[in-house]
C-alpha cells in the first residue's frame, strides 16, 4: 500500500483508540494487514526505474500521506500522538530502506551466502515485510487500495 493508505488507517486508529497501548500494536499490525491485500505502490516494479526516482516518489508520497492525515485528524487527535501512530504504521516500510539503498540492484535482489552481518540484517529487515506484500497492476491496484482504506475508515470511525 502507499504511505498515504497506511497513514490514513493509522489516523483512524489513533482517533478510535486514544490509548497508545492499543493503538501502537494495532497501527503496526495494520501495515501487514493492508499489505496483504493486492495493491499497487511506488515500490512495485522498482527495478524498472532508477533508484533515485523510486526514492523521490516514495518520499514525496509519504510526506503527502502524512500531511493529508494531519489535515483530516488534527482537530480530533493530539498532533504528537497522531504522528507517533502514523510513524509506527509506516515503520515496516522504513525498515526496508537500508536494503534498497545499500545493496539491492536491478539484477540483484538477494543476499549471497557470504554476506556480512550488516547485509544479512538489512536483507532480513527487507524480507519480513515483503512476505506480506501482494501486488496488483494499475489501475486495479489503486482501486483495491481505495476500497481497502474506505473499508477501514468506515469500521474505525
Image: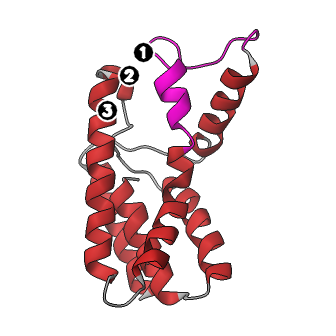
Relative side of 58 to 101, left or right: left
Which residue in the structure is indicated by mark 1? 106
Which residue in the structure is indicated by mark 2? 47
Magenta span of residues: 95-115
Which residue in the structure is indicated by mark 3? 54
Residue 17 vertical placement versus 83 (above, below): below
Residue 54 vertical placement versus 61 (above, below): above
Q: SS at mark 2? A: helix
Residue 75 vertical placement versus 143 (above, below): below
Q: Position of residue 38 (x, y in %)?
A: 44, 51
Give the quarter of the figure containing the C terminus: bottom left
Q: Quick check: is 3 in the magenta stretch?
A: no
Residue 32 vertical placement versus 82 (above, below): above
* Measured Cα–Cα span from mark 1 to mark 3: 12 Å
Q: In which image quadrant can residue 149 be found?
A: bottom left
Relative side of 134 to 53, left or right: right
Q: Position of residue 39 (x, y in %)?
A: 39, 50
Q: Position of residue 51 (x, y in %)?
A: 35, 24
Q: Which SS does the magenta portion mostly show?
A: loop
Amino acid at each position: 500500500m502507499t504511505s498515504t493508505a497506511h497513514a490514513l488507517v493509522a489516523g483512524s486508529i489513533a482517533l478510535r483508540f486514544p490509548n497508545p497501548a492499543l493503538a501502537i500494536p494495532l497501527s503496526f499490525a495494520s501495515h501487514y494487514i493492508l499489505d496483504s491485500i493486492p495493491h499497487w505502490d511506488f515500490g512495485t516494479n522498482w527495478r524498472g526505474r532508477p533508484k533515485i526516482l523510486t526514492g523521490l516518489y516514495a518520499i514525496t508520497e509519504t510526506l503527502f500521506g502524512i500531511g493529508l492525515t494531519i489535515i483530516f485528524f488534527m482537530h480530533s487527535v493530539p498532533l504528537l500522538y497522531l504522528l507517533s501512530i502514523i510513524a509506527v504504521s509506516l515503520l515496516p516500510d522504513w525498515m526496508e530502506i537500508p536494503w534498497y539503498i545499500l545493496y539491492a540492484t536491478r539484477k540483484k535482489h538477494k543476499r549471497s551466502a557470504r554476506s556480512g552481518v550488516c547485509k544479512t540484517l538489512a536483507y532480513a529487515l527487507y524480507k519480513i515485510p515483503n512476505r506480506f506484500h501482494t501486488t496488483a497492476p494499475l489501475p486495479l491496484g489503486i482501486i483495491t487500495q481505495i476500497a481497502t482504506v474506505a473499508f477501514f475508515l468506515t469500521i474505525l470511525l
